[in-house]
Image (cartoon, rainbow, N blue to C red):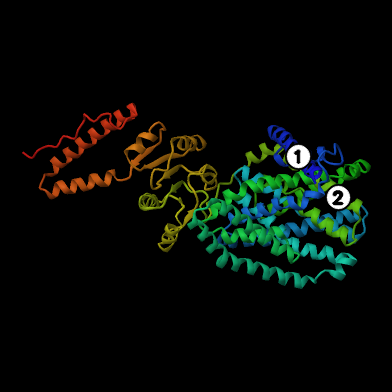
Amino acid sequence: MEHGEQSMLASGLVLLAAALVFVLLFRKLGLGATLGYLVAGAVVGPQMLGLAGDGEDMIGFAELGIVLLLFIVGLELEPKRLWRMKEAIFGLGLAQVALCGVALVAVIWLAAAYPLTSAIALGLPLGLSSTAQVLPMLQSAGRLRTPFGERAFAILLFQDLSIIPLITIVAALGAQGAETGPPGWLLAVESVVAIAVLILAGRYLLRPLFRLIGRLGEREMFVVAGLFTVVAAAAIMEALGLSAALGAFVAGVMLASTPYRHELEADIEPFRSILLGLFFLSIGMMLNLAAIGREPLFVVAMAVALVTTKTAIITAIGLVLKMSWRSALALGLLLSQGGEFAFVLFTQARTGGVIDADTASLFGAIVTLSMATTPFLMMVTAPLRRAGADERTREGPSADGARALVIGFGRFGQTVAQMLLLGGIRVSLIDRQVDQIDVAEEFGHRVFFGDGLRMDLLRQAGADEAALICFCIDGDQLQPDFLASVKEAFPDAAIMVRAFDRRTLIRLAPVEVAHVEREVREGSIAMGRAALDCLGLGGEQIDRLVETFRENDAARLTAQIEAGDMHAGNERTLRVMAPE
């Protein structure tokens, strides 16, 4: 037992070290993290150094990375936006999967001389692209919510949906699959029922659960509940023989319109990044270098044929849709590789006896090689794509793209937010009080649940793109070092702060922000004016009194900040003007 634990720890150490070295190196070279993970896995895997065991031992666990990726993507898609994209999903996506799949079946059947059944089992999976590779590239480039990014996402989403019929087709091609697998119509009915169950569970179980956790204020429970939601949705779909990633995506969509979206996204993101990296490490370790060594020309030629065929077809589809030729070519290159689901379908075909183990390994190497070409292709064609960039970020119906973030939606934050909204400013509202969120929704305000004092959540809420961040939080919670970090992380955003009292204002003074407002100061001055007026003082006299108060107060505050002492400047007492 101890030896096994040591081996597991040693393998983990080797994998982490290899990932750290190669990902940093490939990032530095501009080749992307995905290729770094693939190469790291190949180097330490059984085909080369043999330092970290077998990739098949951890591929099942690592596939959780893809599941988490689809959940986060689902969180970014409200049902209204998904409905708006239905034509792109079922039009553009269907055209890509069908045309690329048929073309690659023909290439394998005619050029590689495989039997037709084997060509179908190999060609149709090759028509799918890598969601795990493409989506992070779009996100890091800030293009996921552009018209270009939405077209790419629509294709990827339909590809994930097409896993269900593709598994049915591959299973039907094999003798074992035809005898034991459920009929296609039953699988389709099960899919619809499963999605309906997830939708109902999201509305009547998940939302009350997260509301309860929000009231308890336990952040750790949010992490646990978020992971439970993803794994449960994926497990339900997998138990029915469907795509686990599709189940996670549906769960994400069901929670996209809730106030808990940003908190969930921030909590799940670290797990997604780690597991997705582990997935690509596993693929690299499973790369059959011996098969490439036996038939290197075939592997290279088929990888070139795969990339060329998909690029040509997707570019042509883009041109038919009236995209510029540069954008259409960029879309074709972006989706030109084989995808991670090809490995799943190759395994299904091998189990059903449609292809043998050597063929599955050979085409697995072809898929991996095609995935390795994508960073190079995108890097080489970057000048061309920049020259033709004519797309603008589209503001969706979610909080993304907001010009202002208001953290805290109590009495103070409500006033600030309403004035911004009256000015036609798009605002993203964040608060931790569930009761406050529920009340706000009754008045038509959409407030996200989350801790606005977390840097990762601010990023998830779109602080990188915001022009203004207003901290309207109750109490004395803000710290100078946190404000300094926010200012450094988001230099393009003006920062405004609600200070609890004079002590808070003095403590935050070292950090230069756009504006600091003591929460009761202006209200007290307004009441003071009303009191003086009620007692019969004239308007001009009241104005002079208010101006004198402001001057004395400002001078006192300056002295207190400079001295760091609340008692400094006390000699400047308020001079009350006696009535004449």
Can residue 137 be spotted in the picture? yes
Can residue 111 be spotted in the picture? no
Q: Residue furthest left?
A: 580
Q: Is residue 558 above or below residue 258?
A: above
Point out residue 107 in the picture as x, y percentages from the top left corner: 86, 53
Residue hosting label 1: 15
Q: Residue furthest top?
A: 563
Q: Are marks 2 and 1 in contact (CB under 8 Å)?
A: no
Of 219 and 77, nearer the camera is 219
Say which of marks 2 and 1 sits in front. 1
**Mark 2 surroundings within 10 Å by alpha-carbon count, few (fewer than 14), some (14 through 19), many (20 or more):** many
Report whether 380 appears left or right of 470.
right
Which corner quadrant of the image does residue 171 belong to?
A: bottom right
Residue lying at 20% horizontally and 39% vertically, measured from the top left? 546
Report whether 190 appears left or right of 387.
right
Which residue type does callout 1 highlight? Leu
Point out residue 463 in the picture as x, y percentages from the top left corner: 50, 43
Report whether 501 appears left or right of 404.
left
Q: Secondary structure at mark 1?
A: helix
Sequence-earlier tag: 2 or 1:
1
Residue hosting label 2: 363
Residue lying at 48% horizontally and 57% vertically, measured from the top left? 215
Which residue type does callout 2 highlight? Phe
Point out residue 321 in the picture as x, y percentages from the top left corner: 66, 55
Q: Secondary structure at mark 2?
A: helix
